[in-house]
Image (spheres, rainbow, N blue to C red):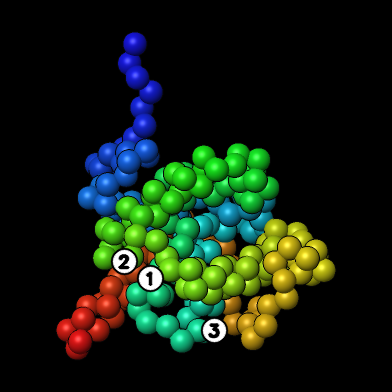
Amino acid sequence: MIGARAWQRMLSGRRLDLLDPSPLDVELADIAHGLARVARWNGQTTGDYAFSVAQHSLLVEDIFRRTNRCNADDCLMALLHDAPEYVIGDMISPFKAVVGGGYKSVEKRLESAVHLRFGLPSHTPKDLKERIKKADRVAAYFEATELAGFSASEARKFFGQPRGVTRETLPIEPLPAVEAQRLFAARFNALETERAKTRLEA
């Protein structure tokens, strides 16, 4: 009997081991492609297209950048804050609570592999993680009220009241997957260029 398969074949040809992921098997093209095809809110959003994790990641990085003093490394960690979901999908918070620690351990191993692949700390430092999470909650509030059918009072209860950011300033209209994929890759490449310039100037 063949043992259970614990790896996923990516379109790049890489085989990513879910139990022991190697940074060498992480490719930006696979991340951008996968996240652009994973729907936020289990697809329960308005519009002709799903609101993808790729688009959410762009939204979070945009909010984070506008509300924090940060460098390109910080912004890249914000952009990649949900990167493991290109492999494991976007599990809504209530279901994560039911599944428990197993999901989190896989997620952390994938986060480490992604970060190391791109020359980042294996895990986001605690203070930075909290600031990214704050931007994540702001994004979730507007996604919930604009796309997922939440009332403002209901969204405030779960995500808090956003401050310093308004709906009019946010790119929140759901996009086709290929466009979300292109924009995610473009933002990644812009940050990589900025990081390379900073290293040269150091």
The answer to whether the residue labelled 2 contacts the one labelled 1, judged by CB atoms less than 8 Å apart, is yes
Residue 188 visible here: yes
Residue designated by label 1? 76
Residue at 66% x, 55% y: name it: 45
| Left or right of residue 194, residue 56 in this image | right
Residue at 54% x, 70% y: name it: 130
> To which quarter of the image does residue 181 belong?
bottom left
Of residues 178 and 74, which is closer to you in this image?
Answer: 74
Q: Amino acid at mark 3?
A: Thr
> To which quarter of the image does residue 141 belong?
bottom right
Q: Amino acid at mark 1?
A: Leu
Q: Element under label 1? A: helix
> To which quarter of the image does residue 188 belong?
bottom left
Residue designated by label 2? 120
| Left or right of residue 113, residue 45 in this image | right
Of residues 114 and 34, which is closer to you in this image?
Answer: 114
Residue designated by label 3? 67
- Residue neighbourhood size for the residue with mark 2, other residues' Cα within 10 Å, grouped as few (<14), some (14–19), many (≥20): some
Q: Amino acid at mark 2?
A: Leu
Residue 86 visible here: no
